[in-house]
Each structure stands twice: as structure tokens, then as C-alpha cells.
Amino acid sequence: MRAVAVTAFGEEPRLLDLPQPEPGPGEVLVRMSAAGLNPVDWRIADGAFKDSVAHAFPLIVGTDGAGEVVETGAGVRRFVPGDAVFGQFWRPGRGLGSYAEYAVAEEKSLAHAPRSVTYTTSAAVPTAGTSAYNLVEETRAGEGKRMLIVGATGGVGTFATQLAAGRGTEVIGTATAEKAELLRTLGATDTVDHTLGPVAEQMRAAYPDGVDILLDLVSGPEEFDAMTKTVRDGGTAVSTNGAADADALTESNLRGFNFHNRPSPQLLEILAGLVDAGRLTALVSNEVPLEQAHEALALSRAGRARGKTVVVT
Ligand SMILES: NC(=O)c1ccc[n+]([C@@H]2O[C@H](COP(=O)([O-])OP(=O)(O)OC[C@H]3O[C@@H](n4cnc5c(N)ncnc54)[C@H](OP(=O)(O)O)[C@@H]3O)[C@@H](O)[C@H]2O)c1
């Protein structure tokens, strides 16, 4: 089968002809229609988790995906061949991932796909959607709270904007002029253009009384520290990129933490339900074939990806 893989950490991913995998006990084999691209995909291929998890090579790139079940391993109860599924296909110990014609997932990493959208749209949901949902839960976003989302126009940000606004949170998101209207359509009450000057300074001028919650999906430690100055006394500041120093934040009377996603099949089912109810929109800006996946990964790595990319398998 065709798959995008690396034969060593740090290599540029390329299209290879690899054997079709077989599902082991508790695993599901899926004929993939689409694989959602997330920044973690190139991080894994670069070896970001090499000290904590075993990896086999060639290592197929990609975590998220959607497609049709073709075979189930021993003990699988929730799925049968023919089911439409979506979820996370990261099996590094077997060198398997989602940018391939066939992929294997643990049963617990999959859910039935939303019925109202295509596989391409479903593939955009798993990592970004579960992260956004958990971020909104863990920051206790809700009625009467004001939240700043830095990186609001990306995969996690567009879901977090919708989920937080859906709970009555006043959401202010970073967006260029080109994307400001889109973000408002998703529920943001205001936007701040990160290309016009430091976001923290613009926020302090526009909202001198600050925000209750900072959700920072972009900044490194130094910029994150500057962003926390927009948060009110007693508020919450979270980084998805390990930029938060929880002890220093506690000293500044803020609740701060580095986020680590904990996906679950229940969460995937909730997201599928929200999509089918028309309460959550998964935006796909670019669809690329497997042959061009390496170029899309390079754009994401360079911080030049625009919107969500899905690799059509
Ligand atoms: N720790 C975890 O468990 C976890 C889970 C999920 C994600 N993450 C991390 O969270 C980050 C976001 O993930 P994602 O999937 O949403 O990535 P993404 O889809 O690539 O989105 C990132 C967005 O940030 C915007 N951006 C870039 N530079 C910016 C700046 N200086 N100020 C404001 N916005 C800026 C870009 O928007 P424009 O195109 O409009 O410029 C881009 O769309 C990634 O680093 C990812 O690895 C971590």
C-alpha cells in the first residue's frame, strides 16, 4: 500500500510502498479516506517522543484519520466491517500511522464518524477537537468569563472558540484581518491582529481590566510570560506548548499549567454528536494527496500552514 513514512528520525517524509498492516488483538484495520494533519505529526517524525515510546521504522506519519472498517482483531466489540469511523491511528511501536491507504487503531482510539459530514471533514476533528474540548473543560470556561485565545484560527483554536463561546464565554481570538470575520462567525466577540503588534499590548489597551482565561496555542516561554500580563488576578493561563512555569504563575496569583491532551472514545462520540447537531464546525482549508503530504508538513513546521490541512488517502 502507499504510505508517507520516514526511515529514521529527522528525515523528510516520503511516499513509500509498504505492506498492508494486520489488526492485532483489540485493534481495528481501516481503509483510510482521509488523514488530518496536526503539528504533532512532524514532531513525532522528528523524534519528539523517542525517549518515552518505542518506534519502529519505516515509521508511517500521522495520527488522525477517518475511513471504513475492513477487519477487526480478536476481542473488538464496538466495531464491525463496514462501519464509518474516525479517531487516532498512532501505533509507533509497529511503525504505523494515518497517512496511508490502510491504518490500524486501538479500538479505544476510535468512534463512529459523524454522519452528516465527509470523511475529509471527520479527519480534521480528533486531535484538535479533543484538545479543544479538554482545554475548555480544564480552564472552566463558561458564562461571565472572558477568554483570550492566541492561535485562534488554527485547528485547536477554531474548535476552542466554538466550544467556549457555546458555553457563554466571551472569546477574543487572534486573527489577521482576512480571518477576523470567520472567527466572529465561529462565536468570537472580538479579534486582535497578531501581525499588527504585540498581542499583549493590544489587549491591555483594549481590555484594561484583563481576561479571566488565557489559552495560548502558539507562544514560547518568553512570549507566554508577556501574554500572562493580560490575565486578571486569580485567573487561569494555559499553554499547549510547554511554555507555562506553574510555580512562577502561582507566585503571580494565577492558576497556570501546561496542557497534555487526554483523548477518549467518549470524547470523540461527543464531538461527532456536536458536529451532527450543527453545533460544531470542522473547517478544512486544504486537501492534499499523499504525494504532497511532505510539502504540507514542511509548511506546518515552518509555521506557514494556513488553516487545517487534510491528506486525502
Ligand atoms: N500539548 C498537547 O497535548 C497539544 C494538543 C494539541 C495541540 N498542541 C499544540 O498546540 C499548537 C496549536 O495546534 P493546532 O493544531 O491548532 O495548530 P495549527 O492548526 O497549525 O494552528 C496554529 C495557528 O496559530 C496561528 N498563529 C501562528 N503564529 C501566530 C502568532 N504569532 N500569533 C497568533 N496566532 C498565530 C496560525 O494562524 P494564521 O494561519 O491565521 O496565522 C495557525 O493557524 C501546536 O503547537 C500543537 O503542537 C498541543
Image (cartoon, helix red, strand yellow):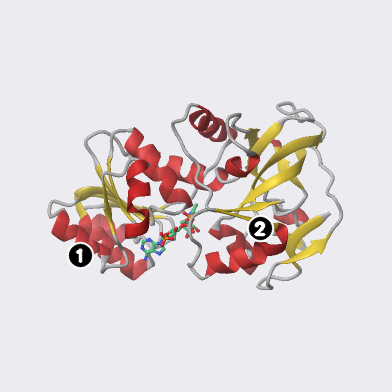
Q: Amino acid at mark 1?
A: Glu
Q: Which residue is mark 2?
A: 53
Q: Amino acid at mark 2?
A: Val
- Dot 2 or dot 1: first in sequence order is 2
- In the picture, measured across the screen, residue 223 lies left or right of residue 37, that is left
Tell me residue 21's x, y (percent).
83, 49
Q: Residue at x 35, y 42 (%)?
A: 185
The percent position of residue 12, horizontal first and vertical second, equals 68, 72
Which of these two is toward me, 113 or 295?
295
Crowding at mark 2 (Cα within 10 Å: few <14, some 14-19, many 20+) = few
Residue 249 position, x and y percent, is: 27, 58
Note whether residue 48 is visible.
Answer: no
Residue picked out by circle 1: 201
User: Quadrant of the rendered structure where residue 291 is?
Assistant: bottom right
Camera-nearest residue between 60 and 77:
60
Residues at discs 2 and 1 in contact (Cβ within 8 Å): no
- Which numbered circle lies on residue 145? none
Indicate left or right for 213 with 265 as reference.
left
Q: Secondary structure at mark 1?
A: helix
Relative height, residue 6 to residue 74 (above, below)? below
- Which is more toward the observer, 305 or 261? 305
Whether residue 5 is visible: yes
The answer to whether the residue bearing label 1 lies less than 8 angstroms from the nearest atom of ligand 1 is: no
Q: Position of residue 266 (x, y in %)?
A: 56, 31
In this rendering, position of residue 43 left or right of residue 227 = right
- Classify residue 56 by image quadrant: bottom right
| Quarter placement of the N terminus | bottom right
The kind of secondary structure element at disc 2 is: loop
The residue depicted at 63 percent of the width and 67 percent of the height is 295
100 lies left or right of 253 = right
Residue found at x 72% / y 51%: 313
